[in-house]
Image (tube, rainbow, N blue to C red):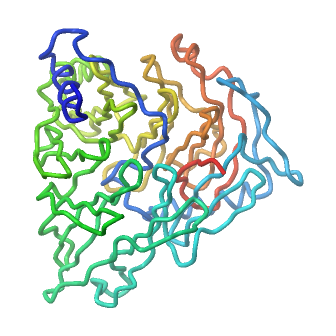
Amino acid sequence: MNTLEERIRAAARAAAGTVPARSVSPLQLPPPPRRRFVRGRWRRGARWPAAAAAAAAVAAVFAGTLAVSGHGAGPASGRHRHTAGVVVFPGSGRILLSDGQGPQWLYPDRKTAPIGTGFTGASLDYGRLLAWRPAQNPKAIPPCAGCGSDVDYYVMTRNATGGRLVLRAEATTKRGNQVAHVDVQLSPGGSALGYIRQTSRPNGRALFSRLWTLNLATGASADLGPVWARTAIAWLGSSTIVVQSGDLRSLVSINVATGARSPLISLTSPALVRAFERARPGGGPPTRIALLAASTVAGRPVLAVDLTAPAKSGSPVNDAIAFLTGESVTAYAAGGPRDYQSLTWGPDGYFAILTTTSPSGCPPLNGAAYVGNLATRHLARVPITGKVLIVGGAPAGAAFSPSGRYLAVDYQGLMTFTATPTIASLTTGTGYPAHLITTAPDLGQTLQGWARR
């Protein structure tokens, strides 16, 4: 097996139980932090009005007094630093925050630095910044008064240097149809963009959704064909993109050079069914599979998917996140039945799962964050003081420090910092040996990533 595509197929066959045990090499979780929000559940720059109000309230309450408790005791502890009597976040590097007013870097000494001028959002992908700003194309006409049209995308270094426009907002059609670029992502290595080009009627109803790629060196673009309007996409190496099928029952791999499509894995996989039923006893077989993340390390693929099944009560769904790691599939279910909100990769097999208890279509009312590692089946709930868990305080984002020693969780107006639990404590199910390190207001901005200087 020499090609990445062959390894992907082997991993999918292994998960489906169609090859002998130990005939496929185990896959490994990639170390780079990945994924901010589950695509399709959170739009870039979107924040619930109630959550924004709650965030402002939290920022006002905690602007002068920051809560501190516990002593670091994860893989490495270390002290948090103080500047002019203010507790700052532990570890080193800088944290990327973003909202509709513009992205900025937050440093351990509480200093901030805006990223460029006029940008309304940014994400951190493979060490580079993908930033966006309101469309400069005068023919991209907003669909209504007070509405916005699509945005222009720029790629730049972490220091906001060398920025260049790579994907310009498209003109509104003569019939008033809007053309938007959805789920724009840099490929590993940053040589290309992958995105969904979606055309919608003025009322917002999607007409066409097609997968496109753009070579950043040559400017050449390629139409890879139709995709489901609400799918997420993920780069699997630099030659393959994974998408969701329209019936929500399988994932499909697409070769970016040829456009060839192949089934990757589906709900009929016995390994997926067993993993889900272990995570959600009595929940029955899953009825939907959604792509969360896909990546590679040393040429080997890893997949993370969201598996759901309707609860017998009919209202919330039974939900679990499953990791396909070669010969086995492991699923995790945090707390009671919930809708999962996001998955964040960390180094050395760590990951964070964020949950919310909000009903469909409502602001996130409450929720929790959990940490796990692929080496063990146990999850540890991220500690947070009850004083700050208010309406609108559901977790909206998470990021591991570059070293993996710390985890930051954004509770929509409040950031919580904890030490990453050890593998030993996760294996025994004891969770966090220490509690909260510190909390700090993030002034209503959303946590996007944690980078080295």
In this view of the protein, which residue sits in the foreground, 248 or 121? 121
Residue at left offset 54%, top offset 50%? 449
- Percent of width and height locating residue 278: 29, 17
Judged from this view, the residue extending furthest toward the right is: 84
Q: Nearer the viewer, residue 189 or 63?
A: 189
| Placement of 85 over or under 316, stated as above or below | below
- Residue 125 position (above or below residue 18): below
**As drawn, 388 above or below 299:** below
Residue drawn 36% across the image and 79% down it: 148
**Left or right for 257, reference 157:** left
x 31%, y 84%: residue: 142
Q: Nearer the viewer, residue 387 or 335?
A: 335
Residue 98, quarter of the rendered image:
bottom right
When asked about the image quadrant of residue 249, the answer is top left
- 156 versus 307 height, above or below: below
Expressed as whole percent of the image width and height from the top left, the position of residue 121 reads 49, 66
- Image point 75% across, 43% down: which residue? 67
Q: Position of residue 136 (x, y in %)?
A: 40, 85
Image quarter hosting the N terminus? top left
In this picture, residue 240 sits left or right of residue 396: left
On the image, the x and y values in percent for residue 230 come to 22, 55
Q: Is residue 98 left or right of residue 356?
A: right
Number of numbered discs visible in the structure rendering: 0
Q: In the drawing, does residue 291 fall left or right of residue 59?
A: left
